[in-house]
Amino acid sequence: KQEVTQIPAALSVPEGENLVLNCSFTDSAIYNLQWFRQDPGKGLTSLLLIQSSQREQTSGRLNASLDKSSGRSTLYIAASQPGDSATYLCAVHAMNYGGSQGNLIFGKGTKLSVKP
Amino acid sequence: EAGVTQSPTHLIKTRGQQATLRCSPISGHTSVYWYQQALGLGLQFLLWYDEGEERNRGNFPPRFSGRQFPNYSSELNVNALELEDSALYLCASSFRTSGVRETQYFGPGTRLTVL
């Protein structure tokens, strides 16, 4: 069974710090991995999509890496700001678990709080 | 460009009633996905519609159903509501490609409360 785990469940940092969020998955047979941001009571905002053939993707202060063989991805946030406070979710389109049929499997997220 | 829209924002029903949730995808997207986010359970895949057809469903009972219209908008119906159906229901859309899945773009969600 494909399981996606995110550590830590919650993280509090002072403004300006660089930080890393971790995501692991149990089955390395994936099409891609996607990072999302969710503000309280709101929908998801797509941050980065990494195809299985790629090692990393960058967007502004965000950098996501993928190591498919070890089943890990990290989301690096540089120079964190209070506006970055949200829950960050990673999700995979898994080959053996309906990934080709639209099923994204999500982790439970890391709740980030950036203090001014 | 308008994003994915969902209506209503909030919906309050009682046990046994039926709920209908609506989703309009981003223009040009043909695939619509439904997810349930219940407290403590995380996001669970419900249904995938593409080109008017149901392509896949998650591990949910048949009282969760829906359809996709010719304009690619979609409706999720939940019959015989139970208390545990209370959740945030998220709709997402994407381009439909053969091969690797495209980015899914999510709407703001419908908060369903069952009393």
Image (tube, coloured by chain):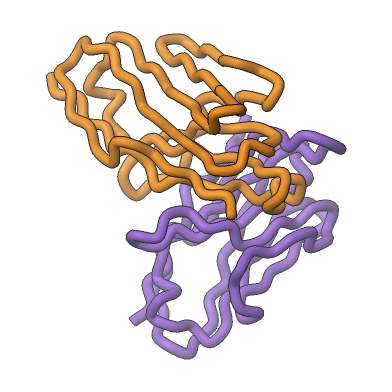
Chain colours: A orange, B purple
With B74 as the anchor, is B105 left or right in this view? left
Question: Which residue is at a point 49% across and 27% down the rendered structure image?
Answer: A73
Quadrant for residue B56, please give it: bottom right
Screen quadrant of the C terminus of chain B: bottom left
Vertical order, B17 against A48 (above or below): below
Vertical order, A56 against B46 (above or below): above
Quadrant for residue A109, please give it: top left
With A70 as the anchor, is B73 left or right in this view? right
Residue B7 is at least partly visible in this image = no
Question: Which residue is at a point 26% across and 32% down the rendered structure image?
Answer: A112
Q: Nearer the viewer, residue B34 or B5?
A: B34
Q: Nearer the viewer, residue A37 or A54?
A: A54
Q: Nearer the viewer, residue A16 or A73?
A: A73
Q: Nearer the viewer, residue A1 or A97?
A: A1
| x and y percentages locating residue A116 in the rendered image | 13, 19
Vertical order, B71 against B83 (above or below): above
Quadrant for residue A48, please give it: top right
| x and y percentages locating residue A105 in the rendered image | 56, 48
